[in-house]
Image: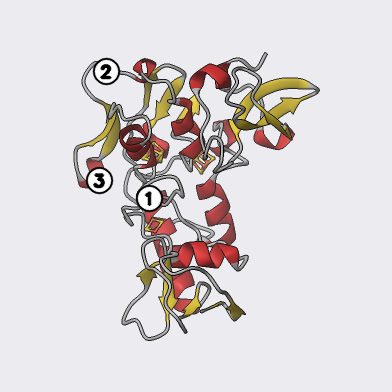
Amino acid sequence: MVVDGVDVCVPEGTTVLDAAMRAGTEVPHYCYHPGLSSPAQCRLCLVEIEGAPKLMPSCTTTVAEGQVVHTASDSAKKMRQGVLEFYLINHPLDCPICDQSGECDLQDFVFAEGRQHGRSTIAKRVIGRDDFGGDVLFYGDRCVMCTRCVRFMEEKEEKPILTVVERGNRAVIDTFFERGLEEANWAGNVVDICPVGALVSKDFLHKARAWDLEHTPSVCPNCSMGCNIEIHSRDNLVQRFKPRSNPEVNGYWLCDYGRGRYE
Ligand code: SF4
Ligand code: SF4
Ligand code: FES
């Protein structure tokens, strides 16, 4: 197959998004995560495939021999710009005080391809902040409803504590009744996989800016599993542990026990 003029050879069953990444092309996406199922709901990863009647979600479309994909055609770019504009209709201008700033997929994608000025004149909805339990805080106004957090809790932690309540413009992530993430052992991963600053760590809150952190690859010292980590430090002081992907050991994840013992 060919992605943006680059010949790519990948195994049958590979998604177009994965194939594009292997060809060195990043396709913007929110709901897709390599460690989770793909609901194809964020509509940001649509690409043009020659012969297809419309733009296709690259996260769920599998490759085919001779397929020709354009991720940056006029129609794909126009679609992404439109989708990003929709995301910003309700999004607050929180970047200066948001912990995700500097490592945020909304900030980065809008900076790269979004409109310079919003056109919406309707009032933004306000959801506010909620304590989801454990180390996790939820800033509902920043959520892009990718459902990665919900799927992680269902598929990986196997404790479906998070869910989507309400519908349409009122849809919001919440915990089931009085349940909270303090019941979980892997909840810190929902902060890692949230593509925006909707789920943040209480421990790390307003502690350091992403661009001030030094990243050092290492191995978690807190048990014999040897999960691969990145140590994020500032001025030689460790600020947090983040998982470093290793399919043979920890996949994409890090447990709360190891994550919390960084000092
Ligand atoms: S989630 Fe991203 S875009 Fe939204 S306020 Fe935070 S840094 Fe800015
Ligand atoms: S809280 Fe984050 S991970 Fe969960 S649905 Fe919203 S944006 Fe996605
Ligand atoms: S990543 Fe493909 S639709 Fe969300």
Q: Residue at x 30, y 34 (%)?
A: 154
Q: Secondary structure at mark 3?
A: helix
Determine whether 81 is above or below 147 in the image. Answer: below
Image quadrant of ligand 2? top left
From the top left corner, tell me how far across and down residue 89 is, in percent.
37, 50
Q: Residue at x 35, y 16 (%)?
A: 183
Determine whether 87 is above or below 213 in the image. Answer: below
- Which residue was labeled with disc 2? 179
* Amino acid residing under circle 2: Arg
Distance (Cα) linking label 3 and label 1: 10 Å
Task: Tell me the quadrant of the picture where the C terminus can be found.
Answer: top right
Is 212 placed left or right of 50 in the picture? Answer: right
- Numbered circle sitting on residue 169: 3
Distance (Cα) linking label 3 and label 2: 24 Å
For label 1, count other residues whose C-alpha is less than 10 Å away and answer few (under 14), some (14-19) or many (20+): some
Q: Secondary structure at mark 1?
A: helix
Looking at the image, can residue 203 be seen?
no
Looking at the image, can residue 102 be seen?
yes
- Observer-nearest of 109 and 188: 188
- Which residue was labeled with disc 1? 89
- Observer-nearest of 203 and 39: 39
Distance (Cα) linking label 2 and label 1: 31 Å
* Amino acid residing under circle 3: Asn
Q: Earlier in the sequence, mark 2 or mark 1?
A: 1
Mark in front: 2 vs 1: 2
Q: Earlier in the sequence, mark 3 or mark 1?
A: 1
Q: Residue at x 23, y 24 (%)?
A: 176
Determine whether 246 is above or below 120 in the image. Answer: above
From the top left corner, tell me how far across and down residue 169 is, in percent.
25, 45
